[in-house]
Image (cartoon, rainbow, N blue to C red):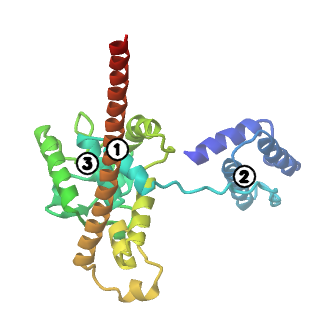
Amino acid sequence: MATRMALKMDQNYFTRVSLGFAGIAEYILRYIAASMKDGLDPKTIRNHWGTVSLIWNAALAQKYVDAVVPKPKLPRRAEVKRKFFTLADVANIISASQGESLTFYWLVAETGLRSGELAGLKLTDIDGERLTVNQSVWGGKEQSPKTNSAIRTLALSPQLVTLLWEQIARQTTKKHGFLFSSKSGTPRDMNVFRKRKMGKSLKSLEIPQAGFHAFRHFNVALMDALRVPLKTIQERIGHALTGSFTLDVYGGKPDWEPNREAARLIANEIERAVSEVAAKAKAAVVGSLSAIGEEIDSISSCKSLN
């Protein structure tokens, strides 16, 4: 899609320029300069150059042209700051949710599943304290997970198991096979959910907008802080390599007990943070009621004096 869009824009600019024209390099340089002046995203400008370069190289290979276009000075890619949720963010999101949404947010926070993996979860993928990732959904279509390592089984905490069985009961009543689905039973469109549901929730909680990957970053960061073994983090998150030659080559088969312990540790931290949010909310309500009571007493005293 990005290539088609870039090609369309390039065609608009080069409408009157023949690829065989000797001054094509000048036009390219002017186009890049104009794009930078107009504030076009550096990544987009580089994509446009990539498209033009591919077309030119294809023409060169077929001998339609006889010279290489000199590469223009391209803008640097802007550094993208990874967005991730803190434990406080996750606790506030979960505290503000209930029912299916509460289950969804706790699940993604505890497991760090990718959005496509979440959309592809079926009721049959939950077996007691085990959740197995067998597929993902992209563009509404079921497909194999991102990599072989993405096909995995994760341990679930007792807290999450309880929430999931409530969700399974809801979906079973609706006769839907997916764990999270649309009204018609098709896999949930995660992009739509993020924009319409999650985005509104983040805005109301005054949490910077972010996607589901922010939960994944949170999950990995929390496991690291909890001193979960690197090999266990790799197995739970579905990454192909740990970065350690010894672990990757000689690590052996996944060990279930560390997986279970990781789930327990993560859930306990989330539960503790959620309890703190609830305690603060309760204290705020009590404080407000106390202030109202004092105001009423003050008014009553004034009336008595009069």
> Of the residues under marks 3 and 1, which one precedes in the sequence?
3
Q: Say whether residue 108 is left or right of residue 88.
A: left
> Of the residues under marks 2 and 1, which one precedes in the sequence?
2
Q: In the rendered picture of this protein, how many numbered marks are placed on residues?
A: 3
Q: Is residue 193 above or below residue 45?
A: above
Marks 3 and 2, how far apart at CA:
45 Å
Residue 152, percent from left and from top: 28, 68
> Of the residues under marks 3 and 2, which one precedes in the sequence?
2
Residue 138 in view in this figure:
no
Q: Say whether residue 218 is left or right of residue 99.
A: right
Q: Which residue is mark 1?
A: 140
Q: Amino acid at mark 1?
A: Gly
Q: For the residue labelled by badge 3, is the local secondary structure a helix, a strand or a loop?
A: helix
Q: Which residue is mark 2?
A: 49
- Which quarter of the figure is the N terminus placed in? top right
Marks 2 and 1, how far apart at CA:
32 Å
Q: Which residue is mark 3?
A: 103
Residue 68, percent from left and from top: 80, 61
Q: Amino acid at mark 3?
A: Thr
Seen from the viewer's position, the closer of residues 228 and 82 is: 228
Mark 2 neighbour density, 10 Å: few (under 14) some (14–19) many (20 or more): many
Seen from the viewer's position, the closer of residues 222 and 8 is: 222
Q: Quadrant of residue 185?
A: top left
Discs 3, 1 touching: Cβ within 8 Å? no
Marks 3 and 1, how far apart at CA:
22 Å
- Which quarter of the figure is the C terminus placed in? top left
Residue 306 in view in this figure:
yes
